[in-house]
Amino acid sequence: MSFLPEEDGPADISALAIFKQNLGLVPRVFRAQMSRPDLVDSQAKLIETLLFAKGSLTRIQKEFILLAVSGANQNIYFPAVHSKTLQFLGVKPEVSHQITVDHHQANLSNQDIALLDFARQLAQQAHAFSADDVERLRTHGFSDEQMLEAVLMVGLTNLLNVVQAGLGSEPDFKARAIVQQKEVNPATGSERPMLERPLADESVSADPDAEFVARVKAGETDAFEELVRRHGRKVYRSLLGLLGSAEEAEDALQDAFLKAFQHLPAFEGRSRFSTWLVRIALNTGLQRLRGRKDFETLDEDREDFRPRLIQAWQENPEDSYSREELRRLVETEVMKLPAKYRVALMLRDLEELSTEEAANALGLTIPGLKARVLRGRLMLRESMVSYFAKTGTGVTP
């Protein structure tokens, strides 16, 4: 429980804009300090300078330091907040969690491992820290300026961890101390920690959007229009599949592209741009879903679904329905499916993303994505049996 009440404070302090632009919210740890807005403003400007602003280290490297040091301090508040931020930067939640727990198991580069070793050593054993630790980091190619930024990020993280502990602020998001999620496997229905799941191997060597991403990063903002043109329909349909409302999907589409544009400088190409963009769109849509009273989580799967109407369809249902009528019928029935299956079908079957791309976009394993698509197809097939099932007199009306 928070030791101090949260206060709104003045609505016009610059800290609010800094947090909302870079994190999408004003974290509770800062709302609890609004009785002194000047202090919140100072902290926000420090965080903006060290973490959000471009520096010698990449934004992701600095975020990783925050996760690793928070983990060393046994602080779960800031990893919960910043793992959400890192999703917009193309980093999967399970990777953020593993860095918090043990970065050696997070499949990082040797250089990043050395950086986080350095950060944890400084945070946990500052009394034993020596010139050898600095030299060790220098042998991995880090400059003096980069090492200074790393030291300052460790100090910033320690400050934030102590402030949060002193205020007792509760996490803004559910903490992932031990992350478990049901494996989407209709044969076993088993549960395994997400960290034990194999991640989809999505090759990014031939990303068709790489040229336009590079041009936007170089300051040619007009090039972003080409990315919008290329992926607008895909993103819209993904949001439509998730939200089930054309009006909401259009609003969320604008939000998703705005977030993508804001965070593009930190995109490092660890996945295809299109996959990263769809993840941003889905996260944007999920934020809207969570605001609904009838919110349906996408994490759990219906283990009890079994198709009941197993009947053969005619080989050519177009004989009874024109292609246009059939398309409208399929889309109508798809929109009636639970959101988790609806969006999987739309990504895989309608937008024709590869299995790896769709799995990465939804944060699923490849077997999990395949199982979800299969269930969606079975549900869709069952809902359409009455249109295409053979009877003694022909097609059921």
Image (cartoon, rainbow, N blue to C red):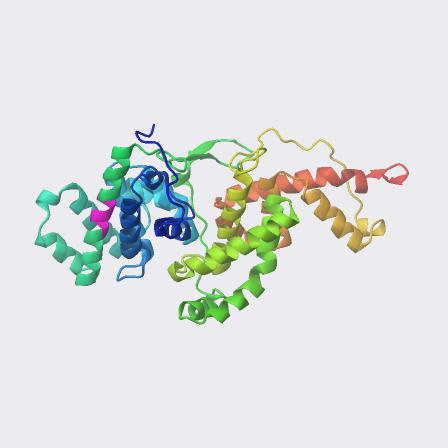
Q: How many marks?
A: 0
249 displayed left or right of 76 = right
Q: Quadrant of residue 370?
A: top right
Q: Is residue 263 magenta?
A: no
128 displayed left or right of 184 = left
Residue 235, position as x, y percentages in the image: 57, 55
Q: Is residue 155 magenta?
A: yes
Q: Which one is in front, 255 or 177?
A: 255
Secondary structure predominantly adopted by residues drawn in magenta: helix
Magenta-colored span: 153-158
Q: Which one is in front, 235 or 377?
A: 235
Answer yes or no: is residue 321 visible. yes
339 displayed left or right of 31 = right
Q: Which one is in front, 238 or 15?
A: 15
Q: Which one is in front, 139 or 225?
A: 225
**In the figure, 118 relative to 162: above or below?**
below
Tell me the quadrant of the picture where the N terminus can be found: top left
198 displayed left or right of 126 = right
Residue at the image point whose x is 27% and y is 48% from the top = 43
Residue 6, position as x, y percentages in the image: 36, 35
